[in-house]
Image (cartoon, rainbow, N blue to C red):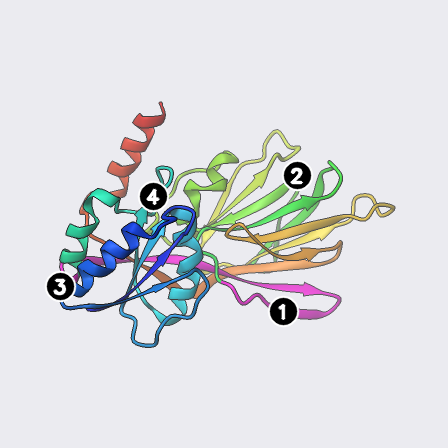
Amino acid sequence: MKKFCIITNPYKDPDFSLTNRMKARIEQKGGSCRRLKEGEELPPDTEGIFVLGGDGTLIRTAGIASERGIPLIGVNLGHLGYLCELEEKNVCGAIDEIMKGDFMIEERMMLSAVSRAKRSEVQLPKKSLNDIVILRKGALQLMELHVSVNGGYLHTFRADGIIVATPTGSTGYSLSAGGPIIDPKARMILITPINAHDLNSKSIVVDALDEVTIELRSRQPEKQERADVNLDGELALELAPGDSITIRAADQTAKIIKLSKISFLEILRKRMQMYS
């Protein structure tokens, strides 16, 4: 692997000092490197991507990289996260290892979605590495969300919303909503209600081959009930009563470059000790 791009969050490396040092190191070792802003098109010959920022920057980049099957690795310049393996202090050594081919690639499941409204069907173009979140909009009132799996009725949640997460996303918003932590290498879909008005409401885990359909039902027809659908934290569309969204595992996966042989359980244990 010799041809790289560096995608930098300018709020985390405002003067691009680390970005430029990394670029110089890659070129010093005989590679080539382009510096890009988030959202810019990747050069066709890109073999690997360094993402500077935090978990959020890496998640946003993963959707673009997955379309081309390009592996990426994160450099954490923000809060402690689960996705970015590198920090500023060890990034030069990591560049050397990657250019020598001394790394593994870990494939992470992603989600795709189709929305249906008034007999029309729209495939959402963006893939989600973390989660797809349906969240109430407007007045502070519960929504009625009718959930089915593979066409079979599962449950109707009366809640502020629902999180449909990948194993990678189990340590994100789903965790804050009381969901379980899942090894990110696993393949399954996690359904977690948000503030459900139900004493028995728990997260539900289904197979990665399943399709999860969520329909917004009307509780108060006299009001303009609406829900926002967010993919990895970005607003994708709005649902009205009668609209639905079907979520399934995407054909593409995010390819994460791994240098450390530390297991996810060891990382989890350290995070739990830090916040206990």
Of the residues tagged 4 and 1, which is closer to the observer?
Answer: 4
Provide the residue span drawn in magenta: 99-126
Q: CA distance from mark 4 to mark 3?
A: 24 Å
Query: Which residue is labeled 3 in the image?
Result: 29
Query: Which residue is labeled 4 in the image?
Result: 77
Query: Which residue is labeled 2 in the image?
Result: 159
Tag 3: amino acid = Lys
Tag 2: amino acid = Ala
Q: CA distance from mark 2 to mark 4?
A: 35 Å
Q: Residue at 71% x, 58% y: name it.
A: 243
The reply to whether the magenta stretch includes residue 230 is no
The reply to whether the magenta stretch includes residue 109 is yes
Which residue extends farthest bottom? Answer: 44
- Considering only order in the chain, which callout, 2 or 1, is on the residue closer to the N terminus? 1
Q: Residue 198's quadrant in the figure?
A: top right
Near-viewer residue (197 or 260): 260
